[in-house]
Image (tube, grey):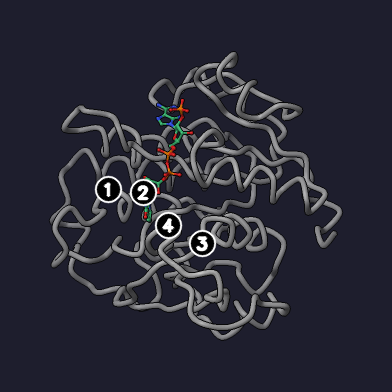
Amino acid sequence: MSQKQELTDVLMVGATGTIGQLAVHAAQRHGLRPRALVRDIQRAAQQLPDVDLVQGDLEDPASLRSAVRGADAIVFTHGSGGDPRPDAREHIDYGGVRNVLSVLGAARPRVALMTSVYSTRSDVPNASLWKRRSERLLRASGLPYTIVRPGWFDHAGPTQRRLVLEQGGTADGGIASDQIAETLVRSLLTDTALGKTFELIAAEGEEPSDWNGLFDPLKADGPYSLDGALDPADLPFEAEPARLRADLDTVRSLNTSGA
Ligand SMILES: NC(=O)c1ccc[n+]([C@@H]2O[C@H](COP(=O)([O-])OP(=O)(O)OC[C@H]3O[C@@H](n4cnc5c(N)ncnc54)[C@H](OP(=O)(O)O)[C@@H]3O)[C@@H](O)[C@H]2O)c1
């Protein structure tokens, strides 16, 4: 076990998903107490036996209030995949982060947010613009965070266990799902991961043994900066739709007022 004493209760958002289930198990392995936010308690009980479940919907902020209560940390692995609505990414990938942050009040949990290796890639069709915008909300919140942008899930061979952490948005490749989950949980427990955003892929070689040393060389994001440390400056705040600028302003004010 490697956790600090003060970090025990972890709210897992997207806990029934591919990465989410593995992240719940990773949290348990590290001696944390995961609490899974789920839409359907009965279905989730089959998927996550022996895990604390709390009902809530990311599209309904009021339903999230009891879920966040007492959480020392939050791991976001949710996603809109399979939702046929054309604006599902805005409502779930982005809106889910906004809505959870909006009900935190004065609480300041440590946060690990999973987005995508393509978060900043405007040249890639269907790149994850709403993921990038969700990252911006978290940075603007002033909460202690790590943002993990994984490559293609399970597009890595069994001997590709060396983790490659990059910044700047040009990385591409695959990684085993269990390593994504482990990295998210390790990021909560490792000081050198604080305030950092990175792409995560795997290469030929051994699993990491020194997590402090793995995160340490990464450049931290600027304080309250909207973008990751080496992200392209191609999404200016001023050019964003008014409702998204308002969301960022709201998140910033929640942090300063503790409301
Ligand atoms: N596939 C890749 O190679 C790859 C690479 C990088 C990033 N990603 C991104 O990673 C994300 C997660 O992927 P995944 O495969 O682990 O996702 P997944 O298996 O589809 O799981 C999505 C999770 O989000 C939850 N969720 C969705 N809408 C919700 C809502 N309104 N309220 C509460 N929970 C909600 C789902 O809960 P329910 O069980 O209730 O549906 C589920 O737990 C995706 O957004 C994807 O774009 C994927």
- Mark 3, residue position: 176
Depth order, front residue of 154/229: 154
Q: State if disc 2 and disc 4 touch (CB < 8 Å).
A: no
Identity, as a three-letter code, of the amino acid under mark 2: Ser
Q: What separation in Å lies between label 3 and label 2 (alpha carbons)?
A: 24 Å
Q: Is residue 19 above or below residue 98?
A: below
Identity, as a three-letter code, of the amino acid under mark 4: Phe
Q: Secondary structure at mark 1?
A: helix
What mark, if any, has residue 134 been given in the picture?
Answer: 2
What mark, if any, has residue 193 been given in the picture?
Answer: none
Q: Secondary structure at mark 3?
A: loop
- Mark 1, residue position: 130
Identity, as a three-letter code, of the amino acid under mark 1: Trp
Horizontal and vertical percent position of residue 15: 56, 36
Identity, as a three-letter code, of the amino acid under mark 3: Ala
- The quadrant of the rendering that contains the C terminus is top right
